[in-house]
Image: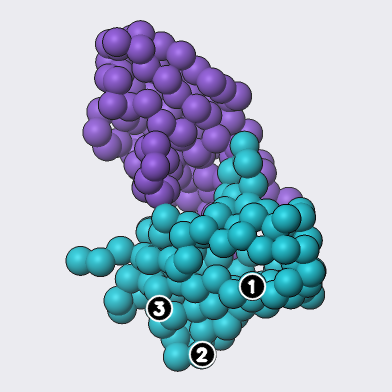
Amino acid sequence: GAGVSQTPSNKVTEKGKYVELRCDPISGHTALYWYRQSLGQGPEFLIYFQGTGAADDSGLPNDRFFAVRPEGSVSTLKIQRTERGDSAVYLCASSLHAATDTQYFGPGTRLTVL
Amino acid sequence: GDSVTQMEGPVTLSEEAFLTINCTYTATGYPSLFWYVQYPGEGLQLLLKATKADDKGSNKGFEATYRKETTSFHLEKGSVQVSDSAVYFCALQRRGGADGLTFGKGTHLIIQP
């Protein structure tokens, strides 16, 4: 079946602009995660959704970052007033139910802030 | 807070060599432990996992044993192939927690024919 998909695959924006990154989880997966991977680093946890609600948003670096999952399926990560330091690959993962089930990762969106 | 430390790369080996990639962790309680692999141009894939002490995870000839006494989860393979060239990430997840994974920085493995 289809895996986790993310769009766009690449996004180039200018400092100060607003961006939205989309994640389509595996069908039927109730848990969804966002991570950020900077060059040469491992993925860093941002936020975890169980259904429509954010169960843990402790990894969001500041209030410029926000994520939604209004219908419990597709999720959008929103970044306001982008900064050059936001440049990274943003990864989405989903798992069947609980946080302890295996997470399946999407291919990521490479964000470049000029 | 939780953390994962793994050996820095790149690690370069010849085909059929024995592989060890070291991973140690710091965490509250007894986390689940994972190895993820990222092949060139592909997304992260789960390679293997172990959920309690002394468990051994295995897949595709790779193995790792959950060692609580040394807080380690070293990845091993007896005979590597060129196709094993990839970046390997060790990760943990707190047991029962509504948390994401905590990853190490990754180890780039290069296998030469």
Quadrant into which the C terminus of chain B falls: top left
Residue at the (35%, 41%) spot, across then down: B47
Q: Position of residue B1 (x, y in %)?
A: 73, 51
Q: Check contact, mark 3 vs mark 2: CB within 8 A.
A: no
For discs 1 and 3, the disc positioned in front in the rendered view: 1
Quarter holding residue A59: bottom right
Which chain comes out cyan in the rendered image? Answer: A
- Of residue A47 and residue A97, the one placed in the foreground of this image is A47
Report which residue position mark 1 lands on.
Answer: A19
Report which residue position mark 2 lands on.
Answer: A70
Q: Position of residue B102 (x, y in %)?
A: 59, 50
Residue type at mark 3 is Thr
Q: Which mark is residue A30?
A: 3
Q: Report the Cα–Cα distance between label 1 and label 3.
A: 25 Å
For discs 3 and 2, the disc positioned in front in the rendered view: 2
Quarter holding residue B77: top left
User: Dot 1: within a 10 Å radius of its alpha carbon, few (fewer than 14), some, or many (20 or more) residues?
Assistant: some
Q: Which mark is residue B30?
A: none
Q: Position of residue A54 (x, y in %)?
A: 59, 80
Against B49, is A92 above or below? below
Q: Secondary structure at mark 1?
A: strand
Q: Report the Cα–Cα distance between label 3 and label 2.
A: 12 Å
Residue at the (28%, 26%) spot, across then down: B83
Q: Secondary structure at mark 3?
A: loop
Chain for numbered disc 3: A
Chain for numbered disc 1: A
Against B112, is B100 above or below? below
Against B34, is B98 above or below? below
Q: Colour of chain B?
A: purple
